[in-house]
Image (cartoon, rainbow, N blue to C red):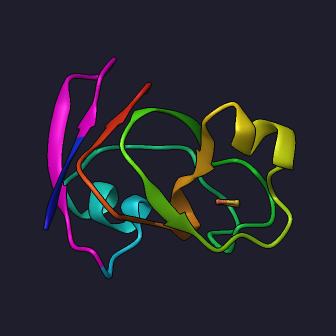
Amino acid sequence: RFAVSFAKSRRDIECGSDQHVLDAARQAGVRLPASCTQGMCGTCKVKLVSGQVEMKHNGGIRQREIDQGMVLLCCSKPLSDLVIDK
Ligand code: FES
């Protein structure tokens, strides 16, 4: 399990390496915007301050955004501890 910190809301949760970050956040009671939960709509897009994820999206994010450190939490699993700008 990895530690996931939401920097702005000051919430720290744990997320299994086989678990999508959005699901872990919801289970911990952290409210995040999301819609399709399948990596298509972009609603769950956030900026990753530090850490790495494995993301399998379906077109909900552009390569340019990925290059800028954005991720879709509904289809991202942690590969390390994470800090999220949210
Ligand atoms: Fe639609 Fe994540 S909720 S891309």
Please give the range of residues in magenta.
5-17
The image position of residue 72, as x and y in percent, is 61, 54
Q: Nearer the viewer, residue 2 or 24?
A: 2
Q: Quadrant of residue 40?
A: bottom right
Horizontal side of residue 58 vs 32, given as left or right = right
Q: Residue at x 52, y 55 (%)?
A: 73
Q: Residue at x 28, y 64 (%)?
A: 24
The image position of residue 21, as x and y in percent, is 38, 60
Q: Quadrant of residue 51?
A: top left
Ligand 1: image quarter? bottom right
Q: Residue furthest top?
A: 8
Q: Quadrant of residue 65?
A: top right
Horizontal side of residue 6 vs 3, given as left or right = right
Q: Residue at x 61, y 35 (%)?
A: 69
Q: Residue at x 34, y 63 (%)?
A: 79
The image position of residue 27, as x and y in percent, is 24, 64
**Number of numbered markers:** 0
Q: Residue furthest bottom?
A: 18
Horizontal side of residue 54 vs 57, given as left or right = left
